[in-house]
Image (cartoon, rainbow, N blue to C red):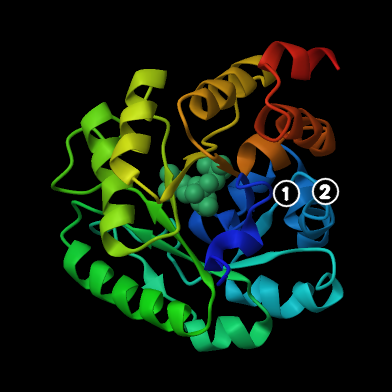
């Protein structure tokens, strides 16, 4: 039987993507809480943790560091991305082709779609090319489905996130990464709208351990397949500890309470 292209970035059907494209998306400010994390080696080391099913990085980091980690890290190459210096309507430059991602050794590709932006049409067309090129090469496709821009009033409302998840399904993503819509019911609706596309929750800015793990637990209970997280892991003093706890919640289906106690 033909394997699903996204199997490479899952474990028992679940997903824990460690995202580390913040140096581009937000800039050095994201490394301030834990200055050592400006060094990509720290994060590639973290991505060897059993709980991490893929590491999402831009092309430059993959070129420079992935050769040293090829056997221990699953690579999710983020194809587009823009700096925080850009002040226009939400948009994202395509920085890497699928062909080149494949050459570097990627197992899957990631792509941001800003539904509701004035640039949505071009972004969706770029996604089409990336998606079809990825299918030709059997690479998994993860959509960062982030409605924002002039067409969007509330980017985390239940209706917006359900639509974001549905865009992932309609456009062919294996995994749709969406913001937490604020309640388990709203997350369940997003999962329902996504059909066979796996929904993962976006980590967001750093919160305390309990609050973070309880939100992850709620998302997983609502049917999300896991998490794509950056700051809530690498901005912590001990990122390995939180990965241990996430492993318990996502893969061992323990409660946040238990995960904290163990
Ligand atoms: P976080 O868990 O730190 O939110 O990272 C997830 C992510 O999607 C990153 O891949 C990306 O750099 C960032 O969030 C974008 O966040 P936003 O566009 O919401 O500022």
Residue for badge 1: 52
Q: Residue at x 60, y 76 (%)?
A: 59
Q: Residue furthest front?
A: 1
Q: Position of residue 89 (x, y in %)?
A: 23, 57
> Quarter of the image holding residue 254?
top right
> Quarter of the image holding residue 64?
bottom right
Whether the residues at callouts 1 and 2 have beta carbons within 8 Å, the answer is: yes
Residue for badge 2: 49
Eyeballing the image, is 169 above or below 187? below
170 left or right, relative to 6: left
Eyeballing the image, is 230 above or below 89? above
Quadrant into which the C terminus falls = top right
Q: Which residue is more in the foreground, 67 or 107? A: 107
Q: For mark 2, does the 10 Å Cα neighbourhood hold few (<14), some (14 to 19), or many (20 or more) residues?
A: some
Q: Residue at x 18, y 51 (%)?
A: 116
Quadrant into which the N terminus falls = bottom right
Q: Number of labelled discs?
A: 2
Element under disc 1: loop
67 left or right, relative to 144: right
């Amino acid at each position: 039987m033909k394997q699903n292209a996204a199997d490479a970035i899952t474990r028992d059907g679940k997903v824990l993507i460690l995202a580390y494209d913040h140096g581009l998306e937000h800039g050095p400010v994201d490394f301030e809480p834990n200055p050592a994390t400006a060094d990509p080696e720290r994060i590639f080391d973290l991505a060897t943790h059993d709980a991490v099913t893929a590491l999402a990085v831009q092309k430059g980091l993959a070129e420079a560091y992935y050769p040293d980690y090829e056997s221990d890290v699953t690579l999710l190459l983020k194809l587009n991305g823009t700096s925080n210096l850009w002040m226009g309507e939400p948009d994202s430059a395509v920085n890497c082709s699928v062909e080149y991602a494949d050459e570097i050794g990627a197992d899957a590709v990631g792509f941001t779609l800003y539904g509701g932006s004035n640039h949505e049409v071009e972004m969706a067309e770029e996604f089409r090319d990336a998606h079809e090129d990825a299918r030709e090469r059997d690479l998994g496709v993860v959509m960062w489905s982030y409605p924002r821009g002039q067409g969007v009033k509330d980017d985390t409302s239940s209706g917006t996130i359900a639509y974001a998840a549905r865009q992932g399904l309609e456009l062919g993503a294996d995994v749709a990464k969406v913001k937490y819509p604020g309640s388990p019911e709203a997350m369940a609706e997003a999962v329902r709208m996504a059909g066979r596309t796996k929904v993962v929750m976006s980590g967001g800015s750093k919160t305390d351990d309990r609050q973070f793990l309880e939100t992850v637990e709620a998302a997983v209970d609502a049917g999300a397949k896991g998490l794509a997280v950056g700051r809530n892991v690498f901005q912590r003093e001990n990122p390995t500890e939180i990965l241990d706890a996430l492993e318990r919640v996502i893969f061992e289906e323990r409660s946040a309470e238990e995960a904290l106690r163990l």
